[in-house]
Amino acid sequence: MSFKRSLVRPDAELIVKDAAKELNAPARRLFGKRILSLGGLAMLSGCSITDDQSVNAMLRKMSRFNDDVQALLFDPNALAPTYPESMITRPFPFNAFYDIDEVPQVDPSGYKLTVGGLAKGKRVWTLDELHAMPQESQITRHICIEGWSAIGRWGGVRFAHVLARAGADTSAKYVAFHCADNYSTSIDMPTALHAQTLLTLTYDGQILPPKYGFPMKLRMPTKLGYKNPKHIVAITVTNEYPGGYWENQGYNWFGGS
Ligand SMILES: Nc1nc2c(c(=O)[nH]1)N[C@H]1C(S)=C(S)[C@@H](COP(=O)(O)O)O[C@H]1N2
Ligand SMILES: [Mo]
């Protein structure tokens, strides 16, 4: 990212431009169309902007501020659009941080999902137990930050039901996911409890194939693609900011769509 370049004598215009890039659409709307002045940014963030370090500190604060604004604007009752079967994208694209020939092959027989952290109910789940719960299906649009989107049909269990049976503390801030390919991500609790957030076990009526995340993908039409973890093996309910694979490399944490 360009703000990593050395700014010994901070160039006001450049910094404002970089900071504006950090603010995504909902946050920008909050400020109106007016571009904030450097002084305004500094005041807002309580940082001085005299050197590289304090500029970076300010930008980090802006980024967290941006997450908070997005979380505030997230309406837990608003539903993402759904689509007719005729609009499903075929074939649905595969994406991961590796090529398709490196997709992990998870063995269903030994597989167990664990729910840890702030949860005092059922902590270990087999696939059969998840399949035995009420199943729902949705046709929604998956949006990848790399510049493509596609409509697909996923089926599975409402994640809120899983959290309830796991005895999760739903006043906790975060739910974190660890995956069989060592991918990770984390989401806010309101999104975890959203009616369209499904722990999916099927894709287009068939058991989720390995490329789409066997044995399960958390599917959230309210979040960008990288927030939708495939091959989940462990879920943690926590108040400590968990980050994630892409989030730790600068992707926006809230990642709403
Ligand atoms: N475990 C895991 N989950 C992941 C990823 C990954 O690399 N590993 N990539 C994410 C990204 S960036 C996208 S766009 C979607 C792609 O899902 P798909 O292959 O079903 O299209 O998975 C998300 N979940
Ligand atoms: Mo993505």
Image: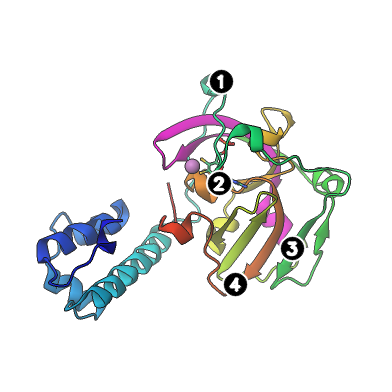
Disc 3 target residue = 115
Range of magenta residues: 139-163
Residue 220, labelled with which disc?
2
User: The residue tagged with tag 4: helix, strand or loop?
Assistant: loop
Question: Could you classify mark 4 by the number of other residues whose Cα lies within 10 Å: few (under 14), some (14-19), or many (20 or more)?
Answer: some
State which mark lies toward you, 3 or 2: 3
**Alpha carbon distance from label 4 to label 3:** 14 Å
Residue type marked 2: Met
Residue 90, labelled with which disc?
1
Quarter occupied by residue 31: bottom left
Disc 4 target residue = 172
User: The residue tagged with tag 2: helix, strand or loop?
Assistant: loop
* Callouts 4 and 3 close, C-beta under 8 Å: no
Q: Nearer the viewer, residue 43 or 53?
A: 53
* Magenta segment, prevailing SS (helix, strand or loop): strand
Residue type marked 1: Arg
- Picture coordinates of residue 160, whole percent (x, y): 66, 56
Quarter occupied by residue 20: bottom left
- Picture coordinates of residue 144, whole percent (x, y): 45, 40
**Alpha carbon distance from label 1 to label 2:** 20 Å
- Picture coordinates of residue 104, whole percent (x, y): 70, 41
Mark 4 or mark 3: whose residue is earlier in sequence: 3
Can residue 205 be seen in the rendering of this structure? yes
The N terminus sits in image quarter: bottom left
Compared with 125, 41 (above or below) is: below
User: The residue tagged with tag 3: helix, strand or loop?
Assistant: strand
